Image (cartoon, rainbow, N blue to C red):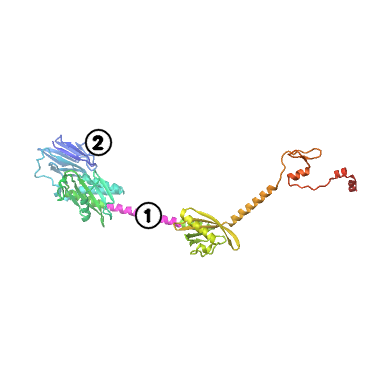
Amino acid sequence: MAKLKVRLPNGSEEAYTFSEEEIYIGKDDLSQQIENDLAIDDETVSRRHARIFREKGHYYIEDLGSRNHTYVNDERIKRIRLADQDQIRVGFTILTFAADIPQDQPTGETAAKADSVDPSNTVDLHYLIINKISQKFNQTNDIDTICEWVIKLSCQSTGADGGAILLFDQDPMPYCQIYYGASDSYRRPLVAQVLGNGEAAIYNPGTDPADTLLAEEMHSAICVPLRSKDSLMGVLYIEDKSAKKFGNSDLRLLTDIARQTAGGLERLILNERVHKEKNSRENLENFLKSLQQSEVTNRALLNAIPDLMMQLNQDGTVLACKMPKNTIPLFGDDLPGKRLHDLLPGEINQRTLGYISKALYSGTVQVFEFDLQVHGKKRFYENRIMACGSEAVLSIIRDVTDRVEAEAAKEQLIRELRDALTKIKTLRGLIPICSSCKKIRDDKGYWNQLELYLQEHSEAEFSHGICDDCMKAWYPDYAKKSDR
C-alpha cells in the first residue's frame, strides 16, 4: 500500500498508510463539522486543503482551492499524478509520497523537479513566508527570539533538520550564534566561502572532490548571506542529515528568507544601538549633572570648614591648599610650591614629615597637636594627616586655641575646687555635750572645752568676750559701773 511520511512543523515525523481510495488532507474544524482523513495541525493549512485519490491504479493529488496552495516538488499544482518519493508541501508541512509500486513512474505529467522549477510558480509560497517574517518582526524586538523563529521557519519550509543564524562583526568568529534543531555546529568551510565571496552556496555530500570515504556521515547544507545595505552582517545556514539533497528552489527560497530577515535584523540592531547610545548619553548627562551638583556641594562644604587644608607630597612640598575662614591665618596665602621646613620650626617639621610617612605606609589617619607663636601669642593647633593617593597626603590643620584654653581654665577651676574641698572640715553625727559645763566628749572619751573642740573639727575660730549676765555674776562691780 502507498504511504505518506508526514514531517510536521515542529520537526516530528508521522507515517500514514493509505487504507481508502481517497483521503482528504487539511486542518480539522469541529465547529464547522469538518474532519479530514489526514488532519494536520498547521495554521498555514486550510480546512479542506487537498485530496489524494487512486484512479486506474495510479495516485493523484488535487488542490481543493486552498489558501496557501499545494506544491509538489516545489511546483504549484492543481491536479497531478504522484510518483514515488514525490515531496508534497501543504502550508509548512511536508509529506513524502511512497508508492506501492516504486517502478511505476508517471510519464507525461511528472511534476518538475526542484532544479528545473520555474520561480514564478513558487511566488505565492515565497510571499507567504516573507509576509510571516514581516509580521514576526512587528511582534517582537528580541533578536534571539527572531533568529530562532526564522531558523525554525526555514527548516520547516525546506524540510531541513536544523540550522543556525550566525552574526559577525569585525571579528572572524560570530558574536551571535542562534541554533535550531539537534545540531549546534555548522560546516565552517561553507560558511567561510559565503562570507568570503558574499554568494549563497549549496553543499551536497559527494559533490565536493575533497569529500572522503566518510561522505555518508556528511550533511547536505545551504548557506546564504545576511546582507545589510552596507556590509555582510552574517549568514543563514541549514542542514539535513538524511539523504535529501537541496536544490536551487531551496536556495532561492532561503535567499528570499535571508533578504527579508537581514533587513529586519538591521533595523533591530540599529534601534538597539540607538537605544544604547541614548541610554549612554542620558547616563552621561545625569552623571555630569550629579558631578556638577557634587562639585557645588563639595565646594560649599569646603568653604564652610574653618580649617587650613593642604595637599602635600612625601617631602612636605605644598601641592595645593585652601586657606581657613574666619580664623587667624597660620601661614601666608602663597603656599603652593613651598616646603614645610620653610613654614614650620625644625622640631614640628620633623614630626609632621614622620606622620606623613606613617599615613602613606599604613593608610590610617594620623592626628597630633603642636603650638606656635602667632602674632606674639601662643596658639595651639591640631593636625590630621591622611593618605590622598599613593604619593600625597591631605593635611587638615585646625586652630584649637580656644579649646585648649577652655580646657586649661576648666582644669584650673577643678584644682581650685579640690583644694577648697580639702580645707573644709565638717561636724556630723551625735556630739555628746555636758549639760552643766558644756564640755564635749571626743571619740577617745576625753572631755574638751567647747571652743577647742570646734576649732579642731571645723574652720571656726573664736574671740573671747563676756556677756552681760556673766559680767553681773562674775564681776558685779564692773557691771554696776557699766550700768551707770
Q: Is residue 236 magenta?
A: no
Front label number (1 vs 2) = 1
Q: Secondary structure at mark 1?
A: helix
Q: Earlier in the sequence, mark 1 or mark 2?
A: 2
Mark 2 Cα within 10 Å, few/some/many (few <14, many 20+)? few
105 or 301, nearer to the observer: 301
Asked if 312 appears above or below 467 in the picture, the reply is below
Choose between 113 and 455: the one closer to the eye: 455
- Residue 137 position in % (x across, y down): 28, 49
Apparent side of residue 179 relative to residue 282 in the rendered image (left or right):
left
Residue 7 vertical position relative to residue 309 in the rendered view, above or below: above
> Per the image, is 278 magenta?
yes
**Can the viewer see residue 29 in this picture?**
yes
Tell me the residue that label 1 is attached to.
280
Q: Toward the viewer: 81 or 335?
A: 335
Q: Is residue 230 left or right of residue 363?
A: left
**Circle 1 residues within 10 Å: few <14, some 14–19, many ≥20:** few
Q: Which disc number belongs to residue 421?
A: none
- Local SS, label 2: helix
Percent across and percent down for residue 383 are 53, 57
Circle 2 sits on which residue? 30
Highlighted range, magenta: 263-292
Amino acid type, label 1: Ser
Q: Nearer the viewer, residue 370 or 220?
A: 370
Left or right, 410 with respect to 48, comes to right
Question: From where the camera sits, is residue 135 visible?
Answer: no
Q: Main secondary structure of the magenta part?
A: helix
Mark 2 residue type: Leu
Count every numbered label the image shows and give the total: 2
Residue at position x 75%, y 45% in the image:
455
